[in-house]
């Protein structure tokens, strides 16, 4: 990958990755309303907005972050499997995306219930909170961010073989 | 293998196990199976019984 293309991919990767964290922060604000709201309309609005943000913003950003992260690793001197911090970042991103895709199904079912005008405020308040997953996901993304900034030392077996061969 | 990697591996195993347990539990107790008590099923028109 040439330097120009690498910078472009890196710029996209940083934008979508930070955007992912920002979108989750907005989602958490709604999640707090959903977890603590007493008013039926507020709960309805929160669940419908959470579903829209998750499906239309967070999922595309997560997938874009995963794809551009793999591309930038393969196109740079770091490689994808040479350094532990890259491998762990990749695995954590895959895990966060898998949990996210599962959560989208859950919140979509909540939004369906919220859209049903016959559902009462008690029905909406009885829905299990997704706040723990939202906060846990944010912590995971921040850990990935720290790993990518500090790049702690440690070569994998594959990385050591590559270095010995070069 | 550096110590920090071992810590991440342990935390990772716990997280993955937790996710798998959630998935398995979700199959049996997913929100889709827990409609609201005031949901459409509870508001179905009464069945007209014949004589």
Image (cartoon, grey):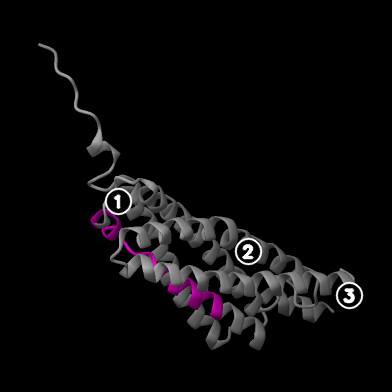
Q: Secondary structure at mark 1?
A: helix
Query: Could you say where residue A145 lies in the image, as x and y percent from the top left?
Result: 61, 80
The magenta-colored residue range is A122-142
**Residue B22 position within the rendered picture, expressed as x and y whole percent measured from the top left:** 37, 59
Q: Which residue is mark 2?
A: A61
* Image vertical order of residue B18 relative to residue A110, above or below: below
Can I make out residue B4 in this image? yes
Above-or-below relation of B4 to B9 = below
Residue depicted at x 45% and y 58% = A103
Distance from disc 1 to disc 3, alpha carbons, whole Å, reads 51 Å
Tell me, for residue B29, which label it has, or none. Answer: 1
- In depth, the one of A111 and A89 nearer the eye is A111
At x 52% / y 70%, what residue is drawn?
A24
Q: State the mark number for residue A3.
A: 3
Please check the rendered image and state whether residue A115 is part of the magenta-colored stretch, yes or no: no
The answer to which quarter of the image holds residue A59 is bottom right
Which mark sits nearer the N-terminus, 2 or 3?
3
Quick check: do tags 2 and 3 share a chain? yes
Question: Furthest residue to the left?
Answer: B51
The chain letter under disc 2 is A
């Amino acid at each position: 990958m040439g330097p120009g293309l690498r910078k472009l991919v890196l710029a996209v990767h940083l934008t979508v990755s930070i955007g992912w964290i920002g979108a989750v922060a907005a989602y958490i604000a709604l999640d707090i309303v959903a977890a603590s709201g007493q008013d039926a309309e507020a709960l309805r609005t929160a669940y419908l907005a959470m579903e829209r943000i998750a499906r239309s913003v967070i999922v595309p950003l997560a997938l874009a972050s995963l794809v551009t992260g793999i591309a930038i690793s393969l196109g740079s001197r770091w490689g994808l499997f040479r350094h532990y911090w890259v491998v762990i970042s990749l695995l954590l991103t895959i895990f966060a995306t898998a949990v996210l895709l599962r959560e989208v199904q859950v919140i979509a079912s909540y939004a369906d219930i919220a859209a049903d005008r016959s559902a009462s405020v008690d029905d909406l308040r009885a829905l299990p909170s997704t706040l723990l997953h939202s906060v846990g996901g944010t912590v995971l993304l921040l850990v990935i961010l720290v790993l990518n900034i500090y790049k702690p030392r440690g070569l994998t077996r594959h990385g050591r073989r590559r270095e010995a061969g070069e | 293998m550096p110590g920090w990697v071992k810590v991440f591996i342990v935390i990772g195993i716990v997280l993955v196990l937790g996710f798998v347990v959630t998935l398995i539990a979700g199959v049996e107790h997913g929100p889709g199976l827990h409609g609201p008590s005031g949901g459409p099923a509870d508001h179905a028109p009464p069945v007209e019984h014949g004589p």
